[in-house]
Image (cartoon, rainbow, N blue to C red):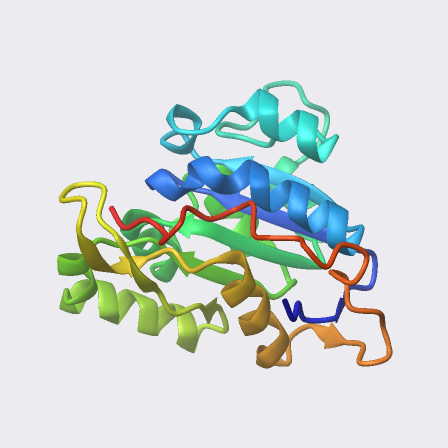
Amino acid sequence: MNTPRLSLPRGNVLLVGTGALPVALLPGWVLYLRELYGWNVRVCLTHAATRLVSADALAALSTNPVLGPDWRPGGGSVEHREAAEWADLAMVVPATGAFVAKCAHGITDSLALATVSFTEAPVFVVPSLGGPRMGSQAVRRNLGLLAEDGFHVVATEKGVSAHTGKGDDGAMPSIFSVLKAVASSGAVATDPSATDPTAADPTATDPTAAPTGSAA
């Protein structure tokens, strides 16, 4: 396993989870990033995401409170600004078509959208879209708008449709594909002299992916 050697100024990573089925894999992403990179991980969830993954599990694995889905009343801080400034790297994983559309058009009507829109950290959008959606001109247009605005859109992969149980396009890519995309983007520093983060456990496998991924 050849995991990219990535270096973040403060080691702060924000994961934004939206309401696609692969968000259920997010606890594995949190654990993997903490264990192999030693990064500080925080998670922000949308309303739909909270129906598919446990905020309690994410808080326990990240050792940080989960942000969202709403702003906390009387919290004493502007949460989206604080989280946006905290992050060295943000990943929307998975990103639904609805989140992509709103983000592409500057809509910030949720804590997750506001945080992603306000941060100056590199933002990697990791879509999870069913095969027919991948052919939609509207979806392609929205992904193109995000790229034009400086977001890094990670290509989807072949996976298994939760609807049909058969192979389909548009699946959320694995964590290894995403980390390689981060490294190749040039938006995050790489350290060739650093030890391979998987070297301590050469038998390590990806705890964040189903056998062949998942497409809605």
Q: Position of residue 112 (x, y in %)?
A: 50, 42
Point 53% across, 30% down: residue:
68
Q: Is residue 3 above or below residue 92?
A: below
Q: Position of residue 34 (x, y in %)?
A: 74, 46
Q: Nearer the viewer, residue 164 or 117?
A: 164
Q: Position of residue 164 (x, y in %)?
A: 13, 44
Q: Is residue 82 left or right of residue 110?
A: right
Point 64% across, 36% down: residue:
79
Point 65% across, 62% down: residue:
121
Point 82% across, 63% down: residue:
9
Q: Nearer the viewer, residue 72 or 123?
A: 123
Q: Position of residue 200 (x, y in %)?
A: 81, 57
Tally of numbered tags? 0
In what quadrant of the picture does the N terminus appear?
Answer: bottom right
Q: Is residue 23 above or below residue 201?
A: above
Q: Is residue 127 left or right of residue 194?
A: left
